[in-house]
Amino acid sequence: MIDKETEDRIFEFIVGAKEPIHNTDIAKALDINRVTVTKYLSVLHSKDLIEFKNIGMAKVWFPVESPLLKAFETNDESNNMISALNSLHDGVCVIGSDMKIVWLNREMEKRHTKLAQLKGKNCFDVFHEEKEICSNCPSKRTLENGKNNRAIIKRKGGAIEISTSPVKGPRGKTVAVIEIVRVVK
């Protein structure tokens, strides 16, 4: 049986660690049996809250930056958030902390092109045909202040209104931005 308090203690310990950590070190620091820790690590991993990498025969564990960002990166259509955003008539895109396109909803794909062709490209280059970030970019502000922002961006043929919301990782850092894009006549 899984104890939520123990699960939370282990997760918080991993989130607070400065670097990936071995299960034996987690067990020792939290005074929990190593086998028990391994069981909880498996549960946390199945919830997409932590990841591991193999170093030789050992696994070291670290937090996933954001389960929601991971869903966008893999375009996991079974995720309720992605399904909901795909049903909107407004354009929606997810911009990473590097200002590159992570995900587009179906409406944005209709307006531009398929996600596979745009993923990893700079949003300002693709959407605004600019060589640098827009001067009043609400996504840049959201990445800086971690808050919702809004702006009207003038471009060839009209203007668009962009409303942004932060995607935060388990440490509270903004790791990406969700943009809602409306065409303004």
Image (tube, grey):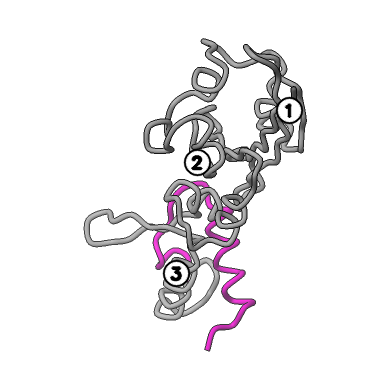
The stretch drawn in magenta includes residue 20: yes
The stretch drawn in magenta includes residue 148: no
Q: Quadrant of the C terminus?
A: top right
Residue range of the region highlighted in magenta in the rendering? 1-27
State the residue at coordinates (22%, 56%).
Answer: 56
| Mark 1 element type | strand
Residue placed most toward the observer, 110 or 22: 110
Mark sitting earlier along the chain (1/2)? 2
Q: Which residue is mark 3?
A: 46
Q: Position of residue 132 (x, y in %)?
A: 55, 12
The total of numbered circles placed on residues is 3
Residue placed most toward the observer, 13 or 138: 138
State the residue at coordinates (60%, 16%).
Answer: 133
Instruction: Indicate the amino acid at tag 1.
Output: Glu
Instruction: Indicate the amino acid at tag 3.
Output: Ser
Q: Which residue is mark 2?
A: 103
Q: Position of residue 63 (x, y in %)?
A: 50, 54
Q: Nearer the viewer, mark 3 or mark 2?
A: 2
| Mark 3 element type | helix
Q: Which residue is mark 1?
A: 161
Mark sitting earlier along the chain (3/1)? 3
Quick check: 105 above or below 20?
above
Task: Judge from the rendering whether residue 10 lies leftward or rightward of residue 88; answer left or right.
Answer: left
Q: Which corner quadrant of the image does residue 121 belong to?
A: top left
Neighbours of disc 2 within 10 Å: few (<14), some (14-19), many (20+): many
| Mark 2 element type | strand
* Disc marking residue 100: none
